[in-house]
Amino acid sequence: MSDRGDPVDGTGVGAATSADQSGFERPGEVPLLEMRGLTKRFPGVVANDKVDLLLYEGEILGLLGENGAGKSTLVKMLFGIHEADEGTILFRGEELKPSDPGDAIDKGIGMVHQHFQLVPPLTVAENIVLGAETTRAGGFMNRRAAEARVRELSRQYGLDVDPTDVVGDLPVGIQQRVEILKALYRGAELLILDEPTALLTPQETDELLAIMRDLAADGVGIIFITHKLREILAVTDRVTVLRRGKSVGRTLTADATTESLAEMMVGRSVVLSVEKPPREAGEAVLSVNDVQVRDDRRQLKVKGASFEVRAGEILGIAGVEGNGQRELVEAITGLRSIVSGNVSIDGQEVVNRPRKVREMGTAYIPEDRERDGLVGPYSIADNLVLTHYYEPPFANHGVRDFEEVDKKAELLVERFDIRTPDIHTPVKSLSGGNKQKVIVARELSDDNTLVVASQPTRGIDVGSIEFIHSQLIAARNEGLAVLLVSAELDEIFSLSDRIAVIYEGRIVAQRDPAATTREEIGLLMAGGEVREDSAA
Amino acid sequence: MPLLAVAFGLIVGAVLIVVSGDNPLVAYRAMLEGSLGGSDAIGRTLEKATPLVLGGLAVAFAFKAGLFNIGGQGQLLLGAAFSAWVGFNFDLPAVIHIPAALIVGGLAAAILGGLAGLLKATRGVHEVISTIMLNFVAANFTEWMVSRDGPWKDPEGGAIARTPLVQDSADLPRIAGLPTGFLVAVLAAVSIWWLVNRSTLGFEVKTVGSNPKAAAYAGISVTRIIVITMGISAFLAGLGGAIQTLGVNGRFEPGFQTGLGFDGITIALLARTNALAVIPAALLIGAMDAGSTLMQARTNVEPEVINVIQAMILFFVAAPSVVRWILQLSEAEDVDTGVDLATGWGTT
Amino acid sequence: MTASAPPLTRSASNLNSYVARNAKALAGLGVVVVALIVAYRWDGTQTTAVMARTVREAAPLILAALCGLVGERSGIINIGIEGQLLLSAFCGFMVGSYSGSIILAVVAALAVAGLAGTFLAWTSIRLRMDQIIAGTVINIFAIGATSFFYVPNRTMATIPTVSLGFLSDVPLVGPMLFDHGPLTYAALVAVAVVHVALFETRWGLRTRAVGEHPSAADTVGVDIFRLRYLNLTLAGMLAGLGGMALIQSAGVFNRGMSNGKGFIALAVMLIGRYRPTGVLAAALLFGFFNALQAQLQFKQVFDIPPQFFGMIPFVLTIAVLAIAGISVRPPAAVGKHYEKE
């Protein structure tokens, strides 16, 4: 349909030309969705720059790109959250200009957001009908009709849910089905799935991919946003790759390979593995013995975890989020009290006092950097001394010494390549990658013996990921014990000297990365059969 | 922007005065004369401003930790009652008596505020609720202390509920013509400014206020800081009550200075929670207060009009966009009031 | 404390599950009934007097707390209830006093408190003002305005009590429930209305969604801001009825006569765990302590200074919140400004 010769945006990436591919366009058939030259500017950035996109009925389109490449902005224009500055969207050949999400829904577009748009205390049925309720006279809810309709849809598409369950009590995978049902209930013909696999177990991911294929077979068009190449290759019919807001490649999936997609996504050939010299691990630095910990709702979340981390090794804890990682890490770092069992660092028992644990030689990169690790309105300098503000040289007898603080900050900004105009800039104005560098700089610049790093690269750009990985490896090479908690199997495999798997608050297995497979770890993460530990 | 807010507040007040059938220019002139016309008037303004400085500081300092101390009234009553007790019950040299009375008053209030902090930090009781409840408790308690059967009742007072007059040695003198109390208040403002901006304790308080999770991560005991902050905040309010007792009233009578807690909020926000800016903000409100008597005498305008003016000032300070809209100013960068209270509702 | 609705008891199995889920509340109700019977047998006159007064004292608290509840269920904190009570009591009184019409008085009270609610929604939605500060503005304004326009020595006609026929003659229960001013009945009816509306209607579903997860409601086309305007205005009207309830029996207005009831109402709402039925129970508890205090003082039963009795409701509030506080979960979006993308 596109009358332009070359939809690729002049970046010269080889495999991505589409015009000459057979089957990329289907003459005579009206595409379900076509975007032409879509542009969206925000103050200071062009989030989407003349993006083109093509999708036929019953197809799955993979929208691939790094964090910040503009994937979300693009679909938000389609879903009526943002308005395009330039370009057109054609839906079934007619121009589409949704004024708001309600309008987009009316036109037959459904979206499953990365952060679920579900109301936890409401039931499945209530969540699904919200905004499109069937009511009796006087505005009274017809609960039975709603539940019946949900059951019917659930059968029709093979999405198994109980309409009377309270959503907040359901596992993430089921919540996602509720989200998909919500879109189908509203008659969605085009379904946008924004990073739907980010929080799923490998098994749940497989189930989702199967559901997507079924939906496509029923004629639903799907836009599948992800940065995981494996999933793109497994399920999509065609791919559009975004980089820095531009569509740098459009291709049929059948013509793509992992390497070609990776190169398009990052703009250079990527080293997917990290340099890591072999190293003998030393004495145990951290030992965790049969620890039990409660979560904020006073439920037992860590149910007897035991493991050791030795000097000069990285122990990677793999697991789906919500299996007790947060509570375990907070117990180790003294932020959360331990119900039973004990944790010791260099033989000293850990108590529920974070400052004490820190002074025992622990560095901690928290999972949620904005919430736990930084004070947004504070300057970079203040954030860089957030854990040491009270002791010399940064303070004497309770009086702060700003000269010393600034000196330290200048040094760290330089050494850790934190991109900022000034050390007095509020940290909240930095990009995600630079924020994480502030934390890493603060934590890894001290004289420590243990590093606890929780999801250290979540949601940041590839450059920063590489930098942080190299810093963790460097810490290990210097003889520090590193505990890495991550939900990303790639990260676990490329960094760890040993892998432990956490499931429902227990360490269910420990493995040597060289002697295991992604599949095995994935199975263990999902609570699959536990064989005898091979490495523990 | 705060000056504009004051101007708009006065305009709204003027409208009310017109509605009630008086001339706002005459009224405001009387107010000005009653607050700044002559040394007596200025002395009255300083006297009125003194508890307001301390009340404003109390609110502003608690804001730094993200806490809303709305209990200034009760804390002030405790401070007043206990300083009166030290004042009339002991016979000491003035250099000891005055500081002792001030400090005991402040500490009594600090205990009340610290209790609210403790309830917040350990039991999740929102401080807005607890400090208001404690206001009623403090009012009832102090009233009983000086009532018919109360231990601090003035034996010569007949049916009047009040304490005896404080000893001369506890009477706050004037220094170089200025009320000592005002000097104490200014000193308190400078100390709080230093504490917030230069000390590690201030850093801890601000960190807890900006991001309690990160504070805990940094090894700061959030519980301890909340209790200390509420304690210091209440101490300031109590000090205000003590100065009022020793310097102006000479004794404790229940129920004086109603509404001071609310004045403190207006002043703290007018000053954008900056401790030094609290002084001019309090002087402004104090001047209105001091001038309202003469205004009433000359024009029959009820002095409560200044409450309405204050509500309007608070509104315009907290909603700079309205001021910009009225003046058709271009959208300047959003002014941060430095306060984010509502998000802490009901959570620990 | 899930917000899911209790189904109407249509069948025996429904009834069983209803009993199972509300076991504690029903047990509490049982204890109260037994205690009332015992007290009535011990001293019928006193018990009747205290209990009738309990319901009367609870009425403005119920209405004010429901005002807070509807606001917070929609995601907006209202600490200006105190001001809404004061403003509506004042305007109701002034209009009633000058016009002689109770209907007009009620209309005026509803209008001014509703308007204050609209104002709160506006400051929060349009001006993005901190909701606690906005509520404080209402409170200070109310104190100032009602004192400024106060006219001493005026009275209005008292609103007569309405006895509901033979029901009011039933011992204990009659004076307790069926012999009150119309605004007391209004409070009891409001509990039922808000409960059913919140859990059984489309409005309720949307309101709960907006208070818990506004963007979820937004993405399915619910107009969050319109709903918040509507709800805060309606909630304000509940407070307006509360203001009328303050003046219904005495027929006079005094400066600052709300006397902290708007704040106590917030505590009632919290103790009632954001549920109308909980609000009813908590308000009755407060009413009971006030009634007991008044009765004991009146009868000089104990030689305890009145100030100590005066403290009881406040100390009790703090104690209850300190003990129960942890388990009260406010609607998740309360106090936060909604960023429309």
Image (cartoon, rainbow, N blue to C red):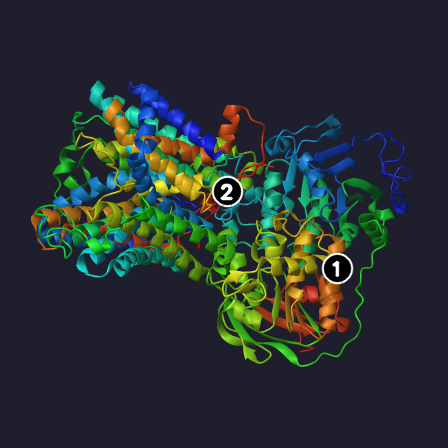
Q: Is residue C77 visible?
A: no
Determine the secondary structure under disc 2. helix
Residue on which disc 1 sits = A467
Q: Residue at x 87, y 44 (%)?
A: A16
> Which sits in the foreground, B137 or A35?
B137
Residue located beneath label 2 in the image: A126
| The image quarter in which residue A452 lies | bottom right
Q: Residue furthest front?
A: B176
The image shows residue A466, relative to residue B312, as above or below, that is: below
For marks 2 and 1, give the one nearer the viewer.
Answer: 1
Q: Earlier in the sequence, mark 2 or mark 1?
A: 2
Relative image position of residue B225 (x, y in whole percent)? 44, 59
Amino acid type indicated by mark 1: Phe
Q: Is residue B344 above or below residue A37?
A: below
Left or right of B143 in this view: B20: right
Q: Is residue A323 above or below residue C149?
A: below
